[in-house]
Structure formats: C-alpha cells, structure tokens
Image: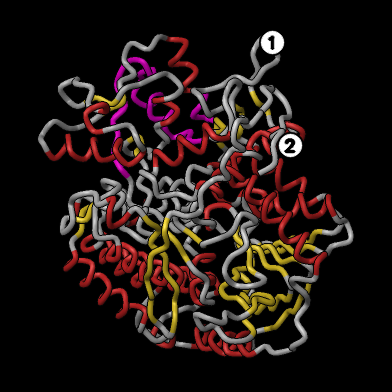
Amino acid sequence: MPVTTVRKSADVLIIGGGTAGCYAALTLSERDPEKRILVVEKANILRSGCLAAGVNALNAYITKGHTPDFYVDYALRDAHGIAREDLLLSMSEHLNEVTERLEDLGLVILKDENGEYVARGNRNLKINGENIKPLLANAVLALPNVEVLNEVNVVGLHLEGGASKDAPGVVTGAYGHGVREEVLYEFRAPAVLVATGGAAGIYRPNHPGFSRHKMWYSPFNTGAGYAMGILAGAEMTTFEMRFIALRCKDTIAPTGTLAQGVGARQVNALGDVYEDKYGLTTSQRVWGTVAETKAGRGPCYLRTVGIGEDAAGSLEKAYLNMEPSQTLKWVAAGKNANEENVEIEGTEPYITGGHTASGYWVDDGRRTTVPGLYAAGDVAGGSPQKYVTGALAEGLLAASSIEEDLNSGLVAPSSSDSVDSATSFATLLQDLLEAEGNVTPEELEAALQTTMDTYAGGIGSGYEFTESSLDEAKARVRELLAVPPLQVSCSTMRDVTHYFEVRERLVVAEVLLAHLKARKETRWHCFAENKSFPEQDDEGFLCYVNSRYRDGAVETFTRPLSERRPEKTAGTERDYRDFTGRWANEHSH
C-alpha cells in the first residue's frame, strides 16, 4: 500500500517531548495562549526521554549560601576549562525558578523541619521523583493551544535556501514518519526547537545482545536531533568530549546516590581509597577506576560497608525512584546496602550535552547557527552539567527567544510551498517497505558498535584510541553510511524506525570521529584518551573544537574561548538573595 501523507502547521514546532521540550511548550503556551504549538514525540511524552523512569535528586540547584557563579565555576572546572561560561550562567540563573515550578506541578521535594529543601551536597536536592515525567507531560497535555503527536519519528528538517558556509538555509519545518503506521508527516513552522536528547548506542554497550538496552542513558535517544541539524549545516561543538558514566556493575545504576548521598568513597580490591590519586572530576573518577583495574588492583567499589542501617535503608528507597534493579540486587543477594561494597564500572561512551559540552553551537537564547532553528537540553552544546533542571532552564530560554523572534518578525512563516525534501523522503519510505534486502538494521547497528568499540575508544579498547585507529573507524563508518536503503530489510514500520535510528547514529559517529581526530591532546582521561597525544596541551587546545557538515564531509575548526560570563561592574558584587523560594539577580548582565 502507498504511504499516506499528513500535513500539519503551527507557529512553533517542538521536536522531542522530553524534559526541555515539555518545559518549552509550557512556557510558550503560558506567555502567549494564541500561539499554536505542536510537540512531536517518537514515543509517548508521559514516559519518554531521560526522565522516563524517574530520578531521586535534582542535581543542579543553587543551594542556600551559593550563587549561580558558584555553579558555573564547578561546571567549568569539571570540564577542564572547555565550556561556555555565558551559557552556564544563563542556565544557572534559572535553576531555582524551574525547580519551584516543578514543585507547583506536584513534584515532592524533600524538606526539613524548617520547611527548607533538603540539600544533597552543595548543588543537589533530594526528591521523590518517580512521577516527574508524567507531571510535566500532563501539564503540557492540559494546554488548549498545544497539540501533541506521539509515536512520530522526525528524521529531517525542511531547509529553504542554500546551506553553504557563508549563507545557511532557513529551517521552515520538518518531516518524519509514523512509528507504527505507514504515514509520512510534513510539519511547517517558522520556529523549530530541537529537544530530542543526545546519542546512545553508538558504541558497544556493557551488556550486548539481548540485554543491549540495559544501559545508563536512554537507549532510544539515538542522536536524531544532532543528525538532522548536522545535515542541515548547523555548527556543532565539542563532540570529542564524550560522556562515560561511572555506574554500579550489572545494574548500571547511578553512583552519585552513593557518593553524594552517603559519602561512599571509591576503593580498589585492596581496600585502598584511590579517588584522590587521580582527581575528582567526572572523567577522572572513571579514569581512576580503569587505571586501578589495569594495574591489577581491581575490581573497584564504592565503599558502603559500615554506613549504618538508616543510611542503607535510605539508599534502598532512593533507588526505587530511579533504578529499582539496584535495590532488587541487594534483595536477591539477601544483604542490605551496608553489608557489602558496590562494585563499579564505566559504561560505553555517549554523546550528550546534558553532562558534557557536546551539541549545537548556540547563543545565549539557544538559537543555533541556522535561522529558525533552536536547541535545548541534551542537544544544546557548550553548557555541561545541566541535568534535569538545566534542561528545563534551557527549554525556558529557548521558548523566550522563540517568543521574541516571532513577535519581532525575525522568523516568519515560509512563503514557499516547496516539499522537495519530503517528496524524496516519501519515495525512500516506500522503497524501504518494498525492498527485499539482505541486511537488517540490527546488523548495521552491530557493525557500527563493533567498529566504534574497537577503533574509537570503547569499553573493549579501554576507552583509548590512536590517530591510526580513528582513520580505520572513519573508513568503516563511511562504508556503513554507503549501504543502499534498498539493500536493507524492513518488513514493518518499526524496522523502518530502527533503520533511521542507525543512520542517525552513523552521522553522529562520523562527526564524533572528526572531533576526536581534531583535538590532538588528552584533556579528559577516558572521555577522550588519545594515545597518540597523551598529554594535555593548553597552549594549542584551550579552545572549542567545532564542525560543520558541508558537501558530504565534516569540516572541523576551532573557536577561541571568548564566550565568557559577563564581568561584574567594578566595585560591585552580583547580589543573589538567599532563599528557599524564588530569587533574583539584582544586577544587570
């Protein structure tokens, strides 16, 4: 049967109904109820994205006695200097505002006897967050001027005009297909926000095969938002700052709950605390664990023996809000959390701007370098350590820019009815459904993951790579990108979805390899462990590595660290009020 076409238009198109996308829709709707907003989600916004299973803490919050500058300093230090201070500050200034809004929506944030939020360290709050995503989603679903389309996979952007380095085209919409139904969707909007999340599944995971989706990052975040922006000529930044999570072995449960919640230290098999030896940044914690294991002092653990029964019970409950499998592992072993240490390991690398600085190159308002296109959350680069509240803050910032640009006429509905890209996509969809190829999407995915694991610094290579191995990875990824669609076997729309997911991962992998090759130093151990250049080179590489995709090739270049946070006025200090509620910056930036 021929593929059916459905066309929709709106004032604002939001691609991705996760954390940032939902909050952007909420903000835009409240500010202008007349604007027509369309949210398109590959899954269902009630349980999609990184918040699908819930969280037990808000890891980005300006606690009492601190300022947004304090958070900027922390994130900048963790990134070894490669981060956009201006973006970090604009995000940090809204962390507490969006936290209050979450509480207004019904999120349970733990409070002490004085009614103040219970902090977990200097930047975190304890919450009961199993239902955090449904709370956000239901608030969006209740908005009369917002339409939500679930189970629609957006794969490309409508781009009008040229896409050269000096004259980028203008984004006027997007196109995609039904996940279950043979339907092609065409979307038109003068403002398009990409909020799809980062990229998992590029590397061979901890548990390949049947359990390959048992991973730290959402396995259904395939880099779609990156890929569509890359192919539209948007400038990208810092893809070489991969993220490798330090996680509980087997369950891949977060370790921050142990390290920050009960102060558990990293120890080797001999019982020696090793974390101070290697450093306490995110990448150094992984590096130390890998190094101790290579030296024959593994396995490595987070020391929970002796933390006390109350602390153990608190841990077991906390994991029920986010990763129940860790609690179930304790139950299955017949031991409480304080009776044995928790073994830890690194995950495969991910590309995610929510933890590192990988993503679109954006301005303070989260505008990309392509007119009409905005980015928020994990796809927006330059601002690491966002976590949940940072993604919400970026949704707010992007919504504010979209509102401003629509009202000023900076972006406007397209005057063209051109649907060339969607027409060619319709042909591709039909071909995929009718082809009797000899390659499955699963086989393409396995080939990609094996290539990246072996030659581009995956788990199997101890996260290390060389100039030569990157060249080999690039050649193999290019071969996979060249596999004709008619050679791929897709019997259902779910197969078609998987095919495009693999294509997205391949595009992201190609850009990642170019970035890894361009940064000829080792600044973030494990995150980018270049054995051809094992030392850090501040003089040559205290800069951003950026890229554009032009004429079928990735062009890399550098930008200086010029995007600093605004300087304080001489003789004054920024004045942030202490609060358990709303706060304000009293000085203009």
Which of pointers 1 and 2 lies earlier in the amino acid sequence? 2
Q: Is residue 334 magenta?
A: yes
Q: Secondary structure at mark 2?
A: helix
When the figure is inspected, residue 377 is found, relative to residue 39, above or below; the finding is above
573 sits left or right of 340 in the view: right
Q: Position of residue 424 (x, y in %)?
A: 58, 89
- The amino acid at mark 1 is Asn
Which residue is denoted by mark 2 in the rendering?
101
Q: CA distance from mark 1 to mark 2?
A: 20 Å
When the figure is inspected, residue 254 is found, relative to residue 173, above or below; the finding is above
Q: Position of residue 499 (x, y in %)?
A: 46, 73
570 sits left or right of 79 in the view: right
Quarter in which the N terminus is drawn: bottom right
Q: State the residue in front, 64 or 456.
A: 64
- The amino acid at mark 2 is Arg
Residue at the (42%, 65%) spot, across then down: 546
When the figure is inspected, residue 334 is found, relative to residue 103, above or below; the finding is above
Residue at the (46%, 46%) spot, across then down: 355
Q: Residue furthest right?
A: 34
Q: State the residue in front, 308 or 238.
A: 238
Do we see residue 43 in this rendering? Answer: no
Q: Which residues make up the magenta segment?
A: 317-346
Q: Secondary structure at mark 1?
A: loop
Count neighbours of disc 2 (C-alpha within 10 A) and say few if under 14, some if 14 to 19, many if 20 or more: some
Residue 442 location, quadrant: bottom left
295 sits left or right of 395 in the view: left
Q: Position of residue 374 (x, y in %)?
A: 63, 63
Which residue is denoted by mark 1 in the rendering?
114
268 sits left or right of 377 in the view: left
Q: State the residue in front, 568 or 272.
A: 568
